[in-house]
Image (cartoon, rainbow, N blue to C red):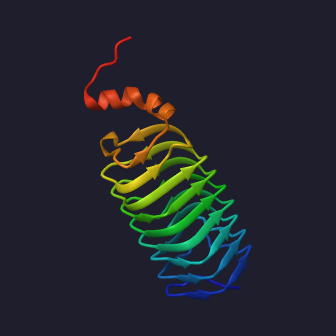
Amino acid sequence: MTTLRTGSDLDGEQLSGADFSGVRAGDVRMLECRLEDCRMDEARLTGLHVVDSTWARTAASALTSPHSSWRDSEIRDSRFGLLDLSSSTLLRLRITDAKIDYLNLRGSTIREVVLTRVQVGEVSLTDATGTSLRLSDCSIGTVELHNNRLASTDLSTSSLQRVDGLGSLRGVVLSPGQVLDLAPAMAAHLGATLSD
């Protein structure tokens, strides 16, 4: 049975039904790995490196993985209470058909990241930088944008309830309907009053 320890180097591993709950490990490397039906409740994997790998049907009440790097990889059909990828580097990461209560991308570098059909309670992009993040056909509760410097954040095809950090909307792509929904908050941010 594969275990995750600090410095573990997994190359081409096929992991199915493993329980990594409560694991504390740093600098774990996964190259061309496939994880299926694994649990990671309250796991902390600082500095995780994931390349050309797929995580399918992963479940975690909380997975904390700051300062990690993900490249050319996918997370799909998965469920997270908290997915903490703060201060990470995300390059061509895809998250598909998942549910995430809180997605923490604070301070991360994001390039060509796509979320498709993901239900997100809250996503923080505070202090995030990079080129492109696209949320396609997602259901989003709150987006935090404070001081984010992403060239493009496309939310236009997703349902969106609330935006925090309206002063950092530069680069955000919204649909006309979303702009109308957010108009009262935008007006209040600008100090304007809407008349009846």
**Would you say residue 190 is visible in this rendering?**
yes
**Would you say residue 42 is visible in this rendering?**
no
Q: What count of labels does the image hold?
A: 0
Q: Quadrant of residue 108?
A: bottom left
Could you tell me residue 115's position as x and y percent? 57, 56
- At 50% across and 46% down in the image, what residue appears? 155
- At 62% across and 76% down in the image, what residue appears? 53
Could you tell me residue 179's position as x and y percent? 44, 33
The quarter of the rendered structure image containing the C terminus is top left
Could you tell me residue 167's position as x and y percent? 30, 42
Could you tell me residue 80's position as x and y percent? 60, 58
Vertical arrangement, residue 185 with respect to residue 164, above or below = above
- At 69% across and 59% down in the image, what residue appears? 77
Residue 139 relative to residue 129: left or right? right
Name the one closer to the observer, 104 or 50: 50
Q: Quadrant of residue 96?
A: bottom right
Pick out the residue farthest to the left: 191
The quarter of the rendered structure image containing the N terminus is bottom right
- At 47% across and 74% down in the image, what residue appears? 69
